[in-house]
Image (cartoon, rainbow, N blue to C red):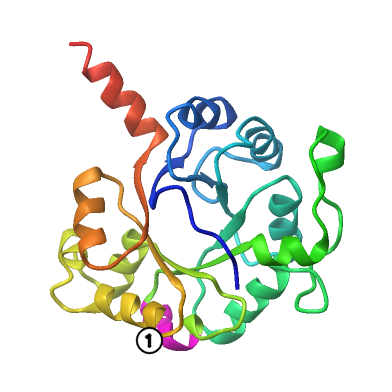
Amino acid sequence: MTTWTPASGTGVWSLLGAAAAEAVSHGSPGWIGLDAQHGFYDDRSMRDALHVVPEVDTLVRVCSLDPGEIGRALDAGARGVIVPMIESAGAAARAAAAVRYPPVGNRSWGPFAPYWGRTEIGAEEANRRAVCGAMVETRTGLDHVEEIAATPGVDMIFVGPYDLALSLGVALDELLAGDKGELRAIVSACRANDVIPGVYAGSPARARHLAGLGFEVLAARTDRDLLVDGVAALR
């Protein structure tokens, strides 16, 4: 399991690219999430962002459960990855294996640290530091959340509320209200297995509400929304 404890559970979700991530880092968020699935990040801009924000723990939401893509993000300096659409213990185990080197995983060696003049850490330390986040964002994932959380090597369950609401056939606000217990069930599964409960909130108000439900790692705002907010404040 990881030794990760973010400086603060409240983080910023970066969609726009390396320059935006670098600017966000100066505000000292608890962590930054680079969205390589639905944001503007490709392989190059993901690497550029990880190069310029070394002082803030950064997680990369990869496009899929692809060991090469997962390893690439970690090689470039990500503290961990968030893997979308995890629906079973088997998929969770494959994600965990891709995050760590043998003998506990199957990640291939090739960190970028020496190229960037940074201290290279060994495989054992890298395995302790790496964060494997499994996204639960479908009805099937929710139905199997206890076994996903119990999978060795999974460090965090990260909820994608938009896709989860779509999959459950409910409005987003109805899901986030927690009235039917889906979100509380995810937090309970995490606590039972010493796994971090995380979630995309999207706004400070939602982040506060979700923290009250027990979520510990929260994406409170996107870089795009922070930019829009800042311009609006000039009026």
Q: Is residue 188 magenta-colored?
A: no
186 relative to 212, above or below: below
Q: Residue at x 48, y 88 (%)?
A: 147
User: Which is the main secondary structure of the residues drawn in magenta?
Assistant: helix
Instruction: Check disc 1 and report the residue beneath it.
Output: 143
Q: Quadrant of residue 100?
A: bottom right
Q: Estimate the x, y position of residue 129 in percent, counting from the top left.
A: 65, 60
Q: Residue at x 38, y 79 (%)?
A: 191
Q: Estimate the x, y position of residue 61 in percent, counting from the top left.
A: 55, 54
What is the span of residues highlighted in magenta in the rendered image?
139-147
Answer left or right for 144 relative to 56. Answer: left
92 relative to 161, above or below: below
Q: Is residue 145 magenta-colored?
A: yes
Q: Residue at x 34, y 30 (%)?
A: 226
Name the element at disc 1: helix
Q: Residue at x 27, y 68 (%)?
A: 214
184 relative to 159, above or below: below
Q: Quadrant of the N terminus?
A: bottom right
Q: Estimate the x, y position of residue 80 in percent, counting from the top left.
A: 61, 57
Count of numbered marks: 1
Q: Quadrant of residue 42?
A: top right
Q: Estimate the x, y position of residue 221 in percent, counting from the top left.
A: 34, 41
15 relative to 68, above or below: above
Q: Quadrant of the C terminus?
A: top left
Q: Amino acid at mark 1?
A: Asp
Query: Toward the viewer: 182 or 122?
Result: 122
How many residues crowd around disc 1 within 10 Å: few (fewer than 14), some, or many (20 or more)?
Answer: some
Answer left or right for 174 relative to 196. Answer: left
